[in-house]
Image (cartoon, helix red, strand yellow):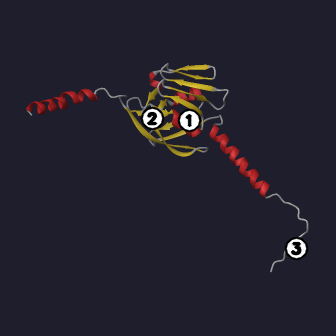
Amino acid sequence: MKKKIVSFFLFVFIGFPFFQAFPQFSGDEEVMMAFRYPAVGSYYISSILNDQTKQTYLPVTELFNLFQIVYQPDIKNFTIKGNYLSPANPFIINLSAMEIQLGGKVFPITPDDFRIGEMDFYLTPAIFEKVFSLIFTVNIDYLTLTLLTEKKLPVQEKQERESLRSKMSVQQNQENLPLLYNRKRKII
């Protein structure tokens, strides 16, 4: 019984600080940011914030889902493959090789440019801007995320098509069809 108590105290005083000294990502913590974009709406995005460097990492697949960008993740090889804005513009995010390919261009990345989370792969806003021309602005004080881009995202194109369809259907329903006999309506 004494051996168990002694071993427990040894673990608490010696072993516990040892395990705390090696966190998975020192200084990284997950934060929820409010993201609002007209074509998407308002969402909360889970991001990673490094307390020491004040660097923010944004989730790749979560954002691509919102923007309706076609992609295929490969968890075993730490890659995401897909088409960016058109089938003629394929991309590969290869975190194990530390490079991103878009079209025919190759963009090298460093270990400080990405994080691998439990549910997603995370990239810095600078990488999103350099590779995909998606300019994200992060406000850490208010935990907000905004996006500026000159390119039309697939979600915007879909929204425009739906609005054109609804306008066309309204116009077809309101079309003035001639009557065979004129009607004279009286107000009673």
The residue at which mark 3 appears reads as: 184
Give how far apart the Cα atoms at labels 2 and 1 are: 14 Å
Whichever of labels 2 and 1 marks the residue nearer the N terminus, that label is 1
Query: In the current view of this chain or complex, which residue is farthest to the right?
Result: 181
Using the image as rendered, state which of residue 131 and residue 76 is in the foreground: 76
Residue 178, given in percent of the width and then of the height, sits at 88, 62
Work out whether 169 lies above or below 65. Answer: below
Q: Residues within 10 Å of mark 2 (few under 14, many from 20)?
A: few
Name the residue rendered at 14%, 29% in the picture.
7
Using the image as rendered, state which of residue 126 and residue 22 is in the foreground: 22
Using the image as rendered, state which of residue 114 and residue 125 is in the foreground: 114
The residue at which mark 1 appears reads as: 64
Whichever of labels 2 and 3 marks the residue nearer the N terminus, that label is 2
Amino acid type of disc 3? Answer: Lys
Give the tally of numbered discs.
3
Name the residue rendered at 86%, 60% in the picture.
177
Is label 1 in a helix, a strand or a loop? helix
Amino acid type of disc 1? Answer: Phe
Q: Along the horizontal axis of the image, is 37 left or right of 173?
A: left
Q: Quadrant of residue 37?
A: top right
Residue 151, given in percent of the width and then of the height, sits at 65, 34
Give how far apart the Cα atoms at labels 1 and 3 are: 58 Å
Query: In the current view of this chain or complex, which residue is farthest to the left?
Result: 2
Is label 2 in a helix, a strand or a loop? loop
Can you say which quadrant of the picture contains the N terminus? top left
Q: Along the horizontal axis of the image, is 118 left or right of 170?
A: left
Work out whether 162 lies above or below 65. Answer: below
Given this view, does label 2 or label 1 mark the residue nearer the observer? Answer: 2
Q: Residues within 10 Å of mark 3 (few under 14, many from 20)?
A: few
Work out whether 160 lies above or below 98. Answer: below
Residue 111, given in percent of the width and then of the height, sits at 45, 22
The residue at which mark 2 appears reads as: 119
